[in-house]
Image (cartoon, helix red, strand yellow):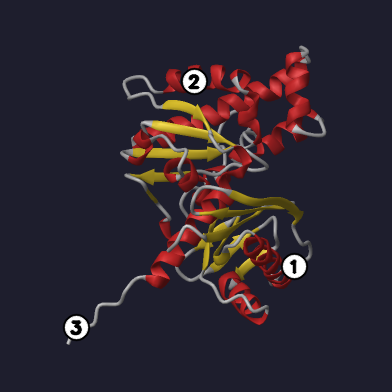
């Protein structure tokens, strides 16, 4: 590894893809956002897109006197990192798709023969929050939860600096069905997510809902309060089960600042009588966390591919 190494990180979302080309010295050579391919059940269009991005990234790196050394690709849904498959991604229409192999072959056909890391977007975001250059060193010890509140709701646990994959199933907290109360029958993310807040308040986006809450709109306020209450239930159980000392809240909703964090901290504290309260903090990297985590995964894959092999006679 030299100071001239660069890695391309690609974070695939339901509507857009965030791309970051980063050097090992910390310099970001390029950032962009492109639309996610639609009607792509076998991820063939995505593979073509990734190959095109890699070819462009290699050209950018070479103009800077560097070269492209690895690609990190992270996707949403249920992801099995070991087999390289997307087990299920409802937003992308994927079910048991061999994404890593498909992208690897397309990269090879495009003349890009570098290690490819494949992972889960939320677990990659957690890795960025805990292990990037900007991370608080204290987050590398004990149990930390990363909970991005975006279009949906998911979580990732990091224990002593290592992300818990759970065979691809860990962290799907948004899919738990609410059993009692006025929201009985709904899944948690149908109440406690940025997408749900916008939809239930009749606003074009969660940001517009926030503006209506600040302006005193009673409908928006009721939807917001529901979101806080259900999210607090989720974070309280997550903390009680895993012993989290810190819960990092990310995603679009976290950008609302004290409007979210003040009532959320109070609600979590009310639910955790006799249990150590976690520190609730906003994500450092915002919606760039997934792409930054993808870069970190790419670096890991490159290091593994260049590690010396010990031969035992």
Label 3 crowd bin: few (<14), some (14–19), many (20+), radius 10 Å: few
Please report the residue visible at 42 percent of the width from the left and 63 percent of the height from the top: 1
> What separation in Å lies between label 2 and label 1 (alpha carbons)?
41 Å
Label 2 crowd bin: few (<14), some (14–19), many (20+), radius 10 Å: some
Q: Are marks 2 and 1 in contact (CB under 8 Å)?
A: no
The answer to whether residue 32 of the structure is visible from this angle is yes
State the residue lying farthest toward the bottom. 313
Q: Nearer the viewer, residue 186 or 264?
A: 264
In the displayed structure, 100 sits above or below 138; it is: below
Q: Which residue is tagged 3?
A: 312
Q: From the image, state whether disc 3 or disc 1 is nearer to you.
A: 3
Question: Residue 113's mark?
Answer: none
Please report the residue visible at 43 percent of the width from the left and 19 percent of the height from the top: 269
Residue 196: x %, y % from top left: 70, 36
> What separation in Å lies between label 2 and label 3 (alpha carbons)?
56 Å
**Quadrant position of residue 142:** top left
**Quadrant position of residue 255:** top right
Q: Nearer the viewer, residue 40 or 304?
A: 304
Q: Nearer the viewer, residue 55 or 170?
A: 55
Q: Which residue is tagged 2?
A: 265
Label 1 crowd bin: few (<14), some (14–19), many (20+), radius 10 Å: few
Residue 65: x %, y % from top left: 59, 62
- Left-right relation of 163 to 86: left
- Left-right relation of 303 to 104: left
Q: Nearer the viewer, residue 121 or 276?
A: 121
Q: Which circle's residue, 3 or 1, is located before the other in the chain?
A: 1
Q: Which circle's residue, 2 or 1, is located before the other in the chain?
A: 1
The answer to whether residue 168 of the structure is visible from this angle is no
Q: Which circle's residue, 2 or 3, is located before the other in the chain?
A: 2
Q: Which residue is tagged 1?
A: 40
Please report the residue visible at 47 percent of the width from the left and 38 percent of the height from the top: 134
């Amino acid at each position: 590894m030299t100071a001239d190494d660069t890695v391309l990180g690609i974070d695939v979302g339901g509507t857009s893809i965030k791309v970051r080309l980063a050097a090992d010295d910390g310099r970001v050579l390029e950032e962009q956002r492109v639309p996610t391919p639609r009607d792509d059940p076998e991820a063939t269009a995505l593979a073509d897109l990734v190959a095109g991005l890699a070819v462009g990234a290699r050209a950018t790196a070479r103009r800077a006197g560097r070269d492209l050394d690895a690609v990190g690709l992270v996707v949403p849904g249920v992801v099995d990192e070991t087999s390289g498959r997307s087990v299920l991604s409802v937003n992308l229409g994927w079910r048991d798709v061999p994404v890593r192999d498909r992208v690897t072959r397309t990269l090879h056909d495009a003349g890009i023969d570098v290690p490819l890391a494949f992972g889960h977007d939320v677990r990659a975001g957690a890795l960025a929050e805990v292990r990037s250059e900007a991370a608080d060193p204290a987050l590398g010890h004990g149990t930390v939860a990363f909970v991005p509140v975006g279009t949906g709701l998911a979580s990732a646990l990091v224990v002593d600096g290592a992300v818990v994959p759970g065979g691809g199933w860990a962290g799907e907290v948004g899919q738990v069905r609410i059993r009692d109360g006025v929201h009985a029958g709904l899944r948690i993310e149908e109440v406690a997510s940025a997408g749900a807040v916008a939809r239930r308040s009749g606003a074009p986006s969660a940001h517009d809902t926030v503006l209506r809450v600040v302006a005193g709109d009673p409908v928006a306020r009721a939807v917001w309060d529901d979101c806080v209450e259900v999210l607090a239930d989720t974070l309280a159980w997550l903390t009680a089960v895993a012993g989290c000392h810190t819960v990092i809240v990310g995603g679009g909703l976290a950008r609302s600042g004290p409007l979210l964090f003040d009532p959320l901290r109070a609600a979590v504290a009310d639910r955790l009588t006799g249990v150590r309260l976690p520190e609730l903090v906003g994500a450092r990297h915002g919606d760039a966390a997934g792409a930054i985590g993808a870069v970190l995964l790419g670096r890991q894959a490159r290091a593994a591919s260049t590690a010396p092999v010990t031969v035992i006679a």
